[in-house]
Image (tube, rainbow, N blue to C red):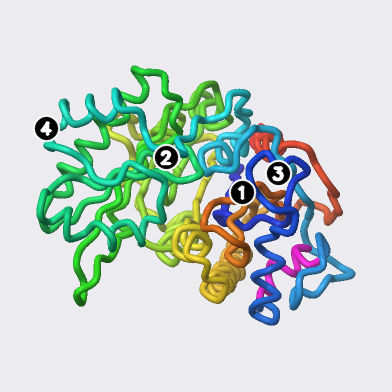
Amino acid sequence: MKRAIIMVIDSMGIGAMPDHAEFNDIAECNTLKHVCEFNKGLNVPNMAKMGLGNIQDFEGITPTKEPIGQYGTLQEKSKGKDTTTGHWEIAGLVSTRPFATFPNGFPPELVNKFIEETKCGGILANRPASGTQIIEELNDEHHKTKFPIIYTSADSVFQIAVDTDMIPLQTLYDWCHIARKLLDDGDYHVSRVIARPYKIIDGKPTRIGKDRRDFSVEPTGRTVLDEIKETGGEVVAIGKIEDIFSKVGITHAIHTGSNKEGLELTLQAVKNDLDLDKIRYANVKKFTPNKSLIFTNLVDTDMLYGHRNNPEGYGKAIEEIDTYVGKIMPELTDDDMLIITADHGCDPTVPGTDHTREYVPVLYYGKKIAPKDLGLTLGFDSIADRVREWLK
């Protein structure tokens, strides 16, 4: 059975795209290059062997004269720099309509409907903010009023933060479902509603990553995931992939609390050691697939380090990923293709904490894939084309 394995290193961009200024980014942004420079080089021998160091001059990632994979640079077609847009395009869906952003907060009519339908009594914030900062700033008022903290960013997100020792986690999820419905019914075209649970740990408000959930708008068209599922294949979503695609085109899914967990599960899936019966959707009958896509999102680079301006942590996260790439590669069969890429940038060394509009790297590896310099390719959707061709 032929398989494709896509690993998305969330936000590992490699340089500003020509239209970066339209997205309020500076020409100097280059997530991977700056992370490498800050850390005086990265130890990523496996991705280096595949050709990562041949794409660009990244400090400490040595170019190789004999790469074992195909390597190149991808330029996004869609108008966006967010997770949903990037992943949809990787799966073959180019977004022609940009998602809406709310630099002045959400409109009163939307907020009032949210308060009415959730019966939450009121809200706090309603402005763009850093998630870690806003919960520290408003935690006391949140505890006093029990109002949810509603905030956004430069991305198209409606984020709801609550202390789940005071507001039950299921209530937070219910409120997110309500927000998703209001946004869709009102055609606000918001990419994601994000549940941001936190607790007070050692006296400090601390977000609980494993309980975060993204409630994305459904894909606006068909993806390669749909094609695989409809023609007898399985689509195994690891991490927040099922959230990004609103479960559409997916047969099996499992959430993760960290990159390490996602990497372990990906390795298990490649080795056929993952118990698929436990993670199969209830509406998907047990079947013998004729092809398989394993699709993993590794979010820590973005969520824990990019947005928090932590290039040291970012570099360590990339190195951890590379160690698992080294474990995955020997487990691949002749019928497997491994793809490593990213969905946008989030340069932790430039001003601001938002995503950055960047090119992304792409690496293809397989025992039957001849090494090649792919140069610059227009469209993340070229990955969907390769997957479609491979699994045909």
Cα distance between the residues tagged 2 and 3:
21 Å
Please tell me whether mark 4 or mark 1 is closer to you in this view: 4
What amino acid type is highlighted by mark number 3? Ala
- Residue 319 x, y percent position in the rendering: 59, 73
What amino acid type is highlighted by mark number 2? Val
Does the stretch in magenta take in 5? no
- Residue 376 x, y percent position in the rendering: 83, 46
Q: How many C-alpha atoms fall within 10 Å of the one at disc 4: few (<14), some, or many (≥20)? A: few
What amino acid type is highlighted by mark number 1? His
Please tell me whether mark 2 or mark 1 is closer to you in this view: 2
Residue at which label 4 appears: 119
Picture residue at 47% right of the left edge, 39% below the top: 103
Q: What's the magenta bit mostly, secondary-structure-wise?
A: helix
Picture residue at 80% right of the left edge, 75% below the top: 62
- Residue 384 x, y percent position in the rendering: 65, 35
Is 306 placed left or right of 344 in the picture?
A: left
Between 364 and 379, which is closer to the camera in this rendering? 379
Q: How many C-alpha atoms fall within 10 Å of the one at disc 2: few (<14), some, or many (≥20)? A: many
Q: Which mark is residue 157?
A: 2
Write down the region rendered in magenta: 44-53
Between 131 and 288, which is closer to the camera in this rendering? 131
Picture residue at 11% right of the left edge, 32% below the top: 119
- Residue 177 x, y percent position in the rendering: 26, 32
Earlier in the chain: of badge 2 and badge 1, it is 2
> From the viewer's perspective, is residue 1 above or below residue 224?
below
Q: Are the residues flagged by discs 2 and 3 in contact, CB closer than 8 Å?
A: no
Earlier in the chain: of badge 2 and badge 4, it is 4
Q: Element at badge 2?
A: strand
Q: Which mark is residue 344?
A: 1
Q: Quadrant of residue 1?
A: top right
Residue at which label 3 appears: 21
Earlier in the chain: of badge 2 and badge 3, it is 3
